[in-house]
Image (tube, helix red, strand yellow):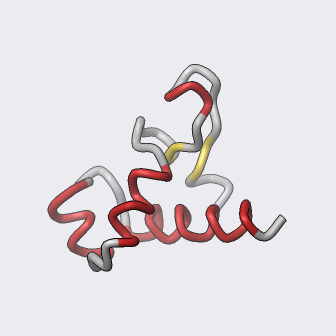
C-alpha cells in the first residue's frame, strides 16, 4: 500500500493521493462509499487507476482510523 499512496505537501495541500496522480484518497473513498464496484470506478471515474490503487485507498483509511 505504501507505494500506492503518497502524501506530498505540493500536491493537494499534502492530502493523501494515489501515487503518480493528483487523485485524493478521499475522492476515491467517497465513490467506494456509494457502493460502486471497483471495476466500475476505474472504468467510469478514474481510468488512470488500477483496482489495487482503490484497495490501497481503503486500506489506507483503515490504517489511519485504527491508529
Q: Disc count in the image?
A: 0
Q: Is residue 25 left or right of residue 27?
A: right
Q: Is residue 32 above or below residue 27?
A: below
Residue 49 locus on image (x, y percent): 34, 56
Q: Is residue 23 above or below residue 1?
A: above
Please identify the residue farthest to the right as the structure is shown.
67
State the residue at coordinates (62%, 63%): 61
Quarter of the C terminus within the rendering: bottom right
Q: Is residue 33 left or right of residue 9?
A: left
Q: Quadrant of residue 51?
A: bottom left
State the residue at coordinates (64%, 24%): 9
Residue 1 locus on image (x, y percent): 63, 62
Q: Is residue 30 left or right of residue 37?
A: right
Please identify the residue farthest to the top as the structure is shown.
10
State the residue at coordinates (48%, 52%): 26
Q: Is residue 46 above or below residue 31?
A: above
State the residue at coordinates (26%, 75%): 39
Q: Quadrant of residue 6?
A: top right
Residue 5 locus on image (x, y percent): 59, 50
Residue 53 locus on image (x, y percent): 46, 61
Between 4 and 33, the residue placed more toward the observer is 33
Please identify the residue farthest to the left as the structure is shown.
44
Amino acid at each position: 500500500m505504501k507505494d500506492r499512496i503518497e502524501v506530498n505537501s505540493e500536491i493537494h495541500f499534502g492530502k493523501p493521493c494515489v501515487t503518480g496522480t493528483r487523485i485524493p484518497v478521499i475522492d476515491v473513498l467517497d465513490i467506494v462509499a456509494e457502493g460502486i464496484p471497483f471495476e466500475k470506478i476505474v472504468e467510469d471515474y478514474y481510468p488512470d487507476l488500477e483496482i489495487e490503487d482503490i484497495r490501497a485507498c481503503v486500506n489506507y483509511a483503515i490504517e489511519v482510523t485504527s491508529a
